[in-house]
Image (cartoon, grey):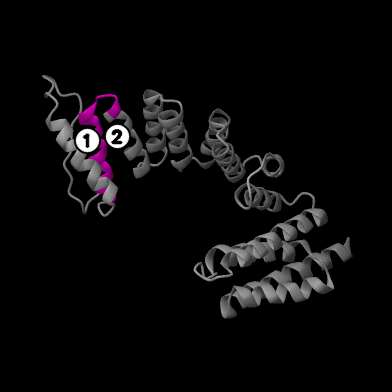
Amino acid sequence: GEANLILHSDDALTTRTADAMLAQKGTQSAVQHLSEVLKRSMRPLALFRRAKMRVQIAFGELDEVGADYARQRDTLLGGALQDLSETIKLDALHAEAYLCRGCLEANIGPSSSKTRKRAMEDLAMAIALRPDDARPYLARAMTYESSGLMQEAIPDYLAAARRTGTLGFPLVAVALIYAHALRDDATAVFYCARALHAEPTCTRALVVRAECLHRMGDHRRALADAVRALRWAPDVPLHRALFARYLVRAAQTPQPRTPHHHIYLPHFHSPPPN
């Protein structure tokens, strides 16, 4: 009752203070502040905030060329995992802690069936606690994919796509599985079209679809997608290379008597026509 409310308020105040120190003095000072507080009382919000800050330091603030880089990173990430586990002990319904721990378990240290199993259990718990959140579905799909379980990854990518609505990435990921792992370019083209419907400026979907159309022999439509990708992101070298490649290939392809696809040559400083 009232005691829990006071404890929760203290925990929130602790994390707000740490955030203020983060803005003023940097991540290391904020972590030190949280560590001092946690010596007196283990609080789930403070533990979770320290875990996130440790990950931030490990991946964003260490000197990657230093002699102790690997050791320092492993120490920080190990500490983050411990903080997340302690958070879950204190708050068994902390969905974010399950999600973060699952992602760390899936991506750090030596890969093994045991660590993947733990990661999958954590991500499944995050999904159970927040079934409308796309992130644990994405994390589990990527864990399946990194383990070579492509068919298992597809339903989770599609579940994430249904929950994001305007994000093309999950559908492009499905298209890539069909294009490269399952050797099914036609289905990959279908999912690229869905990705572009969700996110019309998704240049990755254009690139993947162009590659598939090129392999299918539809060089003019491949060129049209390369043109569109180049118009949206003209400074990407890959887009220029694909445009040049497909332009040459389309020029070598006989023009159909009745053109079925219009190629719009770009003006690079304006959005594409509707």
User: On the image, numbered disc 2 is attached to which residue?
Assistant: 210
Along the viewing direction, whichever of 206 and 264 lies nearer the viewer: 206
Q: Does residue 176 appear to the left or right of 262 in the view shown?
A: right
Judge whether residue 14 is colored magenta: no
**Up/down of 220 relative to 65, above or below:** above
Tell me where the magenta segment starts and ends, as one range.
215-233
x and y percentages locating residue 153 in the rendered image: 56, 33
**Picture disc at residue 207:** none
Q: Residue at (62%, 75%) from the top-left corner?
A: 28
User: On the image, numbered disc 1 is attached to which residue?
Assistant: 223
x and y percentages locating residue 137 in the rendered image: 59, 40
What residue type is disc 1 on? Leu
**Up/down of 26 relative to 257, above or below:** below
Q: Is residue 274 visible?
A: no
Q: Residue at (63%, 45%) from the top-left corner?
A: 111
Judge whether residue 230 is colored magenta: yes
Q: Are marks 1 and 2 in contact (CB under 8 Å)?
A: yes
Q: Does residue 177 appear to the left or right of 110 in the view shown?
A: left
Classify mark 2: helix, strand or loop: helix
Q: Residue at (65%, 74%) from the top-left corner?
A: 30
What residue type is disc 2 on? Ala
Along the viewing direction, whichever of 273 and 229 lies nearer the viewer: 229
Q: Does residue 174 appear to the left or right of 16 in the view shown?
A: left
